Structure formats: C-alpha cells, structure tokens
Amino acid sequence: MTTDSQITIAPVRKICCIGAGYVGGPTMAMIAKQCPDIQVKVVDINEARIAQWNSDTLPIYEPGLHDVVVESRGRNLHFTAEVDEAIAEADMIFISVNTPTKDFGVGAGRAANLEFIEKCARKIAEVSSGHKIVVEKSTLPVRTAEAVKAILSRASSGATFDVLSNPEFLAEGTAVEDLLAPDRVLIGGESEQAIQALVEIYANWVPRERLLTTNLWSSELSKLTANAFLAQRVSSINSISALCEATEADVDEVAMAIGTDSRIGPKFLKSSVGFGGSCFQKDILNLVYLCEFFGLPEVAEYWEQVVKMNDYQKQRFVHRIVRTLFNTVSDKKIAIWGFAFKKDTNDTRESAAIYICRDLLREKAKLCIYDPQVNPEQIRKDLAAVLKNGDSELSQASAQLLADNVEIVSDLKTASKDAHAIAVLTEWDEFATADFASIHDSMKKPAFIFDGRNVLKELPLAELGFEYHGIGFRR
Ligand code: UDX
Ligand code: ADP
C-alpha cells in the first residue's frame, strides 16, 4: 500500500466504475453530469445491460434518470463491456458490484457473498499499472477493505493502490434527488491524499460541510448501521401496527404523534406490509453474522429481531386476507396491485410482494398481478425462485401452480375484473386515482381491498361498497 509521502496524487481525470446496476449507473451519471472534465466509463460483464444503458430504454427505472444520462452520454459518460481497458486507463476505480446474501456454505443465509468484489479486486490487480485509487461503493461487511487491499498489494505489475470506502446512501425511486442533494457523503480511507482526491470530485456539487471523512472501518460499518437503524424503525412501527389492530388505535396517528417528537422524527415510520429492497435485510443479516463472528451473540440476536418482525408483518398480512375471505382463498382471484419493493422503481429484490404472492399461491389463490414498471418475466422469475424453497429445481407441482395460478397484466382494471379481493403491495401514485366505482362493479361481491401501504385509506371506498382493510387500524 502507498503512504502519502511515496506518491503525489494528481486530480482525477478518468474514472471507471465496475458494475452498471442500481448503484453504479445513477451515481456515475451524476458524477459525469457534475464534472464535465472527468471521463467516466461504466463497465459491466453483462453485455445486455450495457446495451440497455446505451439505448433509450435504460435497464433501471428511476424518475429523472433518463435526462441525466442523456445529458452526458457520449460526452464524458460511456457504458462499455470493455472492462480491462477501462480499468487500465482510469485513475480512480469504483467497485459497484452486487453483494447478495450467501446462499451456500459457511454463513449461508447471513454473510454477504463477496465473490464478485474479490473478482473485481483481482481483475484490477491484473490489468493496472502506475497508481490507482480503488473506491468501495457496494455495501460491504466491515473490514472488507482489508481483503481488497491484500489482493491489490500483490499485483504482479507493480501497480500501487489506495483503497477508499464511499458507501452509497441513495434510495431507489429517489436516486437522482438523493445524488443531487445528499444529506452527507461519507469517505473513509487511510491516505489523506486519496481521500482529498475523492472529496474534490464531490465538492463540484455537494457543499463541503456535507463531505464527511472517517477511517476505513467506520465508513464501512456506518453504511450497515444506517440501514439497520432505518429498517429497525420500520419494524418498530410495524410491530405497533399489530397492537393497533388489537386495540382500536390507528398506527398512522401513532406514527404522526411520535414523529413530531424531534428526538424521533417523522421519517421511516410509515407502517407497511414489510420492508423490502436489496439492502435492508441483507445488511442486517450481515451485521448479525459479523456480531456472531466477533463473539457478540446478544448483539446479533438484537438485530436479528428486526428481520423476524419483518417476516411476521408479511405473514400477518396474508393471514388477514385468508381469514377475512371466509378462511379460504383457494381458487379465488386476487388482484395484486404492485410488485416492486416500493414505488418509482422497477426493482423487486426482497420485495414483500414476492413472499405475499408465494404464500397466497400456497393457499391456492389465483393471482392477477399488475405493476406499472416491473417486467413480467422478472415477476415469474422471482416467484419461481421462492417456490423452489431452497431446492435447485422447481418441483412439477410448483411449476404447475405458477403456470395455472399466476397471470400478469398491464392495467389495474384487467387485474381486478372478477376478483374477490385486491391486495395493494406497492404504493404507486396511480393506485389512488383508479376508477374505483367501475372496479367495484367488475369485482365479485363482497369486494375486498387489503391495502398493504395505507394509500387508499382516505378514499370513500366503503361508500362504493368495498370492504376495506389497511395496516394498523380497524374500521
Ligand atoms: C435503502 C436506504 O434508504 C439507502 O440509504 C441505502 O443506500 C439502500 O437501502 P432503498 O432500499 O432504496 O434504500 O429504499 P428505502 O426507501 O430505504 O425503503 C426500504 C423499504 O422500506 C421499502 O420496501 C419501503 O417500502 C419500506 N419502508 C420505508 C416502509 O415500509 N416504511 C417507511 O417509512 C420507509
Ligand atoms: P446494485 O443494486 O448494488 O447496483 P446490481 O445487481 O443492480 O446491484 O448491479 C451490480 C452489477 O455488477 C450487475 O450488473 C453485474 O453484472 C455487475 N458485475 C458483477 N460482477 C462483476 C464483475 N466482476 N465485473 C463487472 N461487472 C460485474
């Protein structure tokens, strides 16, 4: 590794980002927009994904992203599958590859799978020369930088490296806003010069007081901790939603009342059918694994409860549907409104909808799914993956269930026609403005709505004849 006295780091002119996903794509598009003098190349081994980034239909849906990409694409923003070349010519390399929860071997179901990170580090070591700054952007277990450094320091080419941690705090659905005006940017590292090189990039548009610098390990751990705290807030309010339903309190009123306490704050207090997304569950499980690894079982157990409460919330929602529909949903059509893990994204990773659909399918319900942005193939893929239940192949019975009981349609009306119930699983804005009178006419009676996001709560649905159920209150 380098030290400040050995090498003088020039301002960054060329950036390479490995991984053109939900993190790499938007982040690099913003850097390219704000720093026209820096050449930014985003690389990915998935050539189809690169082709999409170069087309009019971007691989990810994010409000405002298309404009940001088009502004710089071809000027100082390039998407390419020529990984080696882009790494070799860059001064700074961001690693933004996926780090899913391991589903095999030691730490299965908890630890992060760092295979893709390690492959990136090896690739960088292989093709680099001179001095480079390597930036961890993906969310990683604390002390991953140690492994990255160990691999890089053995580069046979004699190249030298500084490693920084610069975790991404953007939320999907608001990525462009979050990147444009972040609450803070966290940069952890050992070399002051390398830290400053990255600070200067962000300083092009982020006020300097929002650029926080820390040591490497604090930066890595802060990302996991931030997500664990946010998820804990959702699980906490969801736990109270169950108590509200038992006591005639209303969870939205409780959330508002406690959210006005400045020590608590209003955000991440919205009760829901359960949190999803690529980060929360993965990061908490990873924290749990780390705590166990470092001999802290009580701390591990404390955080694991956040995930357990989230599973309970999803199960509770399905139980409520089944119980209310006279204890059986077998052969009943249920319209599923929304499949993404939240609105304004086409991402379905860990979406509550996947587990709710799975459990309804196990009850032999007939599902008719509509989501404005999620690709139908993705929905089938996600359902097939959970119906496998850990097996390598989908059983014939499950494949049959998927073929016979799942229909994916392109509008709300078709989804709801002849349905016994509607289950709202994502809070898409368009749901609240649907034509509920005609939807009611087309449904089986009594017509039920189970609103897993409380987005239809203020509508006069009872007047139209619906039996309406939300989360955390009873009417
Ligand atoms: C999260 C973090 O917010 C972000 O900083 C980190 O970098 C990545 O993980 P993201 O997963 O994109 O971002 O979405 P977020 O808005 O945090 O929502 C996560 C889940 O919690 C969603 O399923 C959402 O619907 C749910 N949620 C969120 C609630 O149920 N209630 C809330 O009040 C807030
Ligand atoms: P995230 O939400 O963290 O951005 P994604 O799965 O959307 O996660 O994106 C990660 C991207 O990283 C994927 O497109 C994947 O193909 C890419 N990737 C994984 N490993 C490598 C690698 N060794 N080299 C280049 N790209 C990689």
Image: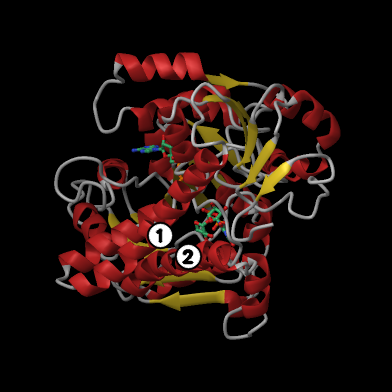
Q: In the visual, does 14 lie left or right of 455?
A: left
Q: Please give the residue where the numbered disc 1 appears in the rendered image.
A: 309
Of the two numbered discs 1 and 2 on the same chain, state the one appearing first in sequence.
2
Q: Position of residue 62 (x, y in %)?
A: 65, 43
Q: Say which of 205 and 450 sits in front.
A: 450
Q: Is residue 156 above or below residue 8?
A: above
- For label 1, count other residues whose C-alpha is less than 10 Å away and answer few (under 14), some (14-19) or many (20+): some
Give the residue displayed 45% in from the left and 68% down from the top.
226
Q: Say which of 307 and 33 sits in front.
A: 307
Secondary element at image label 1? helix
Give the residue displayed 81% in from the left and 37% down from the top.
434
| Label of residue 239 in the image | 2
Q: Is residue 13 visible?
A: yes
Q: Are marks 1 and 2 in contact (CB under 8 Å)?
A: yes
Q: Position of residue 436 (x, y in %)?
A: 81, 36
Secondary element at image label 2? helix
Q: CA distance from mark 1 to mark 2?
A: 7 Å
Q: Amino acid at mark 1?
A: Met
